[in-house]
Amino acid sequence: MTNDVDDDLWSAIGDPTRRRMLDMLLIDGGGTATTLGQQLPVTRQAVAKHLGVLDRVGLVRAAPAGRERRYRVDEAQLARAVAQLSSVGSAWDARLQRIKRIAETIQNTQNAQQGGKDQGE
């Protein structure tokens, strides 16, 4: 499972501003650094840098639009990210279930030992 996780992809998605930008691009069907910057509490230059990170990991693709570049979400790469998240989530669910079973076994053992002490008094 861990071999299938793309750390660069998750590092890019890990930033809240970039996640917000992906949401905006998905809702609007695309956008430029200028249009995104008008909706975010960061500068246009910061937006451009964030878009560069998203572009490097393949989450967005840019096409010339006049003097600017118009960005769109790469749906195949986004689907890959979702699949990775699902895989990581499933692995953690399994780990948490094992931890729960261990904790329940310990609790049951302690309860049984306590019950034995109570009867012996």
Image (cartoon, rainbow, N blue to C red):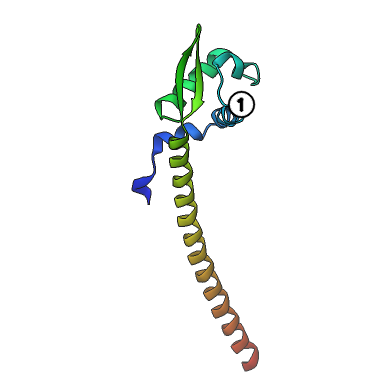
Q: Does 107 sit above or below residue 8?
A: below
Q: Hey, which residue is sitting farthest bottom in the picture?
A: 120
The image position of residue 46, as x and y in percent, is 54, 17
Q: Does 81 sit above or below residue 41?
A: below
Report which quarter residue 41 is drawn in.
Answer: top right
On the rendered image, what quadrant is the C terminus found in?
bottom right
The image position of residue 114, as x and y in percent, is 61, 83
Q: Is residue 120 left or right of residue 84?
A: right
Report which quarter residue 109 is drawn in.
Answer: bottom right
Residue at the spot x=40%, y=25% of the render? 56
The image position of residue 1, as x and y in percent, is 37, 52
Camera-nearest residue between 90 and 82: 82
Three-letter code, disc 1: Asp
Q: Hey, which residue is sitting farthest top in the picture?
A: 67
Q: Does 76 sit above or below residue 39?
A: below
Residue at the spot x=61%, y=26% of the render? 28
Q: Is residue 44 left or right of residue 57?
A: right
Residue at the spot x=45%, y=56% of the render? 91
Camera-nearest residue between 43 and 28: 28
| Residue at image mark 1 | 28
Mark 1 burial class by Cα count in 10 Å: few <14, some 14-19, many 20+: few
The image position of residue 68, as x and y in percent, is 51, 10
Q: Hey, which residue is sitting farthest left in the picture?
A: 3
Residue 108 appears in view: yes
- The local secondary structure at tag 1 comes to helix
